[in-house]
Image (tube, rainbow, N blue to C red):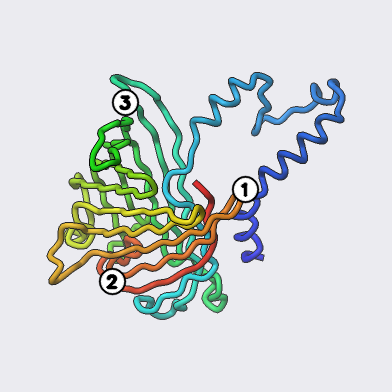
Amino acid sequence: MRYILVYILFFVPLLADDIIDANSQIQEIDTESNKDDYINYEFPRYEDIDTANSILQRFSTHNENYFMPLYYSISGIRAPYKPYEVKLQVSAKINLFDDILFGIGLFFAYTQVSFFQMYSGEISAPFRDNDYMPELTFYKALDWNLFGGKFYNIRFGYLHKSNGEETPQRSRSIDRIIGELMYRNGDFRVDIRAWFYIGYDPRDIRRYIGYSDLKLGYKFLERNHINLTIHNLFHNYGNYKGSLLLEYKFDFNRTSLYLQYFQGYGDNIHQYKIKSKNIGIGISIKQ
């Protein structure tokens, strides 16, 4: 039953457009009296399309949203856990202000990554680890031309990351003030982030998380995307404590085939100083 629930929770939103289309056809047949009788306090219907759009436009995906039913650890997983599991990430943001001052906006975002030992029924199929990442970020659109492309967006804000554990053996958390600059040139993108810490636990976690990262992205042949993220960018590469994340996507209509390869330290914050190699396959929601 728990397997069925996991798939339902992820796939139902992907079918939302089809359900809405079907409902709209049914509503055309309904009389005005039937529409007036309908009440839904959780998901109200807006007669004014401008009101509906203003609400919907405040919500957006943030980081990648993916579901990998097979995520295999080549190294790094320890007993009693199995090396194959489910990995999923959900990420969304809400726009709080469009223009506070000088074109600067503000959004709140939340991202969660979960590692689910769904195939380990003998140990009750637990969630092995979870990373929770709320953030509050200022942003501003840019138009700075450079090398045939342009810097198009800048962000500055607060990001918390923790695993929600209480015991000293498992508790991990970091609080950072982060700046991010985004560049694009045709189908090529570069995002670079740098930060300083305002809180962290354990004390050696900064050595592995570092102070910056770099994401390179390229779209080719219309529906193919490849991304490379280098974590802990400016570190001693002779004794490197960071990580590399390689992602590939092939777009379909509403979703994408998604492949991920991770190598290095900190696949999740609990494993910040455990080196691992992991590969997974699944689907992602198109951004």
Earlier sequence position, callout 2 versus callout 3: 3
Residue 30 drawn above or below residue 229? above
Q: How far apart are marks 2 and 3 (CA)?
A: 39 Å
Secondary structure at numbered mark 2: loop
Earlier sequence position, callout 2 versus callout 1: 1
Residue for badge 2? 274
- Which disc is residue 179 wearing? none
Q: Looking at numbered disc 3 in the image, what kind of residue is underneath it?
A: Ile
Residue 103 in percent (x, y) is at: 32, 23
Residue for badge 3? 104
**Residue at 33% of width from left, 44% of height from top?**
185
Q: In which quarter of the image is the N terminus?
A: bottom right
Q: Give the image quarter of residue 95.
A: top left
Tell which of 266 and 200 is nearer to you. 266
Secondary structure at numbered mark 3: strand
Q: Name the front one of labels 3 and 1.
A: 3
Q: How far apart are marks 3 and 1 (CA)?
A: 32 Å
Residue for badge 1? 13
Q: Looking at numbered disc 1 in the image, what kind of residue is underneath it?
A: Pro
Tell which of 90 and 200 is nearer to you. 90
**Residue at 77% of width from left, 37% of height from top?**
23
Residue 84 in percent (x, y) is at: 48, 75
- Residue 100 as seen in the image, left or right of residue 81: left
Determine crowd level at label 1: few under 14, some 14-19, many 20+ residues with C-alpha closer than 10 A.
Answer: few
Determine crowd level at label 2: few under 14, some 14-19, many 20+ residues with C-alpha closer than 10 A.
Answer: some
Residue 154 drawn above or below residue 210? above
Q: Looking at numbered disc 2 in the image, what kind of residue is underneath it?
A: Ile
